[in-house]
Image (cartoon, rainbow, N blue to C red):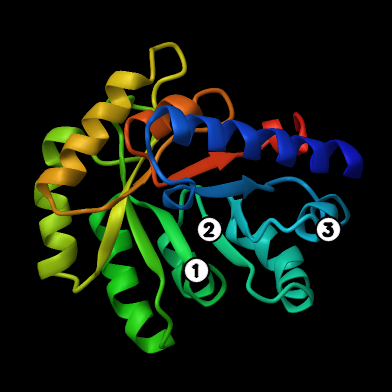
């Protein structure tokens, strides 16, 4: 497992670098988030030892159980919450994570607006866009995105850094990445959390600044 994960990380790094060259972008313009959800500390340690310092988790409780000790042992590590966030877990999330990619509804924005100033921490926030308007998936519908971003800023006092999307599994991802980039541009947002193991090269072509890669590094769960 450990050797395979380190090899997976190296292979993904090569692919990210190639995608950046193909898109005529600087490699430093793309942050690789190694998605370590469901993997324990023993599986994550070799990837940390190989130099990876940005990780993604889906659940607050799971991250809380394994990451404080790992972060203490590997200073400079940053943690991104890429899964849905319940409003009653906001205080814990703000204390642990450096970025939250799933801001998707007024009640969560309101809770973040209260918790962040009280915490004294700076946490990067991404609004999740449900580009396919899938009923089973979290996220703001594209036609509601501008109003929601404005409310986050003006009503709840949040600094929004960028947008996140997860395209429908049965559709080509490119149009969804293009739509997300378009919404970001008109709202003055510079960061785009787009692309996973199967499509991160395409996401980079469409301007992704953060790619979320799990199985290509750690293997299938």
Q: Is residue 145 above or below residue 175?
A: below
Whichever of labels 2 and 1 marks the residue nearer the N terminus, that label is: 2
Identify the residue at image location x=75%, y=29%: 220
Split into 4 quadrants, where in the image is the C terminus?
A: top right
Of 8 and 148, nearer the camera is 8
Q: Is residue 119 above or below residue 199?
A: below
The residue identified by callout 1 is 98
**Residue 82: x %, y % from top left:** 50, 49
Q: Is residue 86 above or below residue 117?
A: above
Left or right of residue 18, residue 3 in this image: right
Element carrying mark 3: helix
Question: Do the residues under discs 2 and 1 have CB atoms within 8 angstroms?
Answer: yes
Of 92 and 28, nearer the camera is 28
**Residue 16: x %, y % from top left:** 55, 36
3D distance between C-alphas at marks 3 and 1: 19 Å
Q: How many marks?
A: 3
Element carrying mark 2: strand
Judge whether residue 219 can be spotted in this image. yes
The residue identified by callout 2 is 80
Judge whether residue 166 can be spotted in this image. no
Whichever of labels 3 and 2 marks the residue nearer the N terminus, that label is: 3
Split into 4 quadrants, where in the image is the N terminus?
A: top right
Left or right of residue 98, residue 139 in this image: left
**Residue 53: x %, y % from top left:** 65, 61
3D distance between C-alphas at marks 2 and 1: 6 Å
The residue identified by callout 3 is 45
The residue carrying pointer 3 sits among few (fewer than 14), some (14 to 19) or many (20 or more) residues within 10 Å by Cα, namely some
**Residue 141: x %, y % from top left:** 21, 35
Identify the residue at image location x=69%, y=31%: 216
Left or right of residue 124, residue 62 in this image: right
Identify the residue at image location x=59%, y=29%: 197
């Amino acid at each position: 497992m450990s050797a395979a994960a380190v090899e997976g990380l190296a292979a993904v790094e090569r692919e990210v670098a190639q995608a950046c060259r193909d898109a005529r972008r600087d490699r430093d313009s793309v942050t690789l988030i190694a998605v370590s959800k469901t993997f324990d500390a023993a599986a994550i340690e070799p990837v940390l030892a190989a130099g990876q310092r940005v990780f993604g988790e889906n659940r607050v409780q799971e991250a809380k159980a394994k990451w404080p000790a790992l972060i203490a042992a590997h200073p400079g590590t940053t943690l991104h919450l890429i899964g849905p966030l319940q409003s009653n877990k906001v205080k814990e999330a703000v204390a642990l994570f450096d970025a939250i990619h799933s801001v998707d509804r007024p009640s969560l924005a309101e809770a973040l607006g209260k918790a962040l100033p009280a915490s004294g921490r700076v946490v990067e926030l991404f609004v999740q866009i449900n580009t396919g308007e899938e009923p089973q998936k979290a996220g703001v519908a594209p036609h509601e995105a501008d109003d929601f971003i404005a409310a986050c800023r003006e009503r709840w006092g949040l600094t929004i850094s960028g947008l996140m999307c997860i395209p429908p599994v049965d559709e080509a991802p490119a149009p969804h990445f293009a739509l997300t980039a378009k919404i970001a541009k008109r709202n003055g947002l510079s960061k785009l959390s787009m692309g996973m193991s199967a499509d991160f090269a395409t996401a980079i072509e469409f301007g992704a600044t953060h790619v979320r890669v799990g199985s290509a590094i750690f293997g299938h769960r």
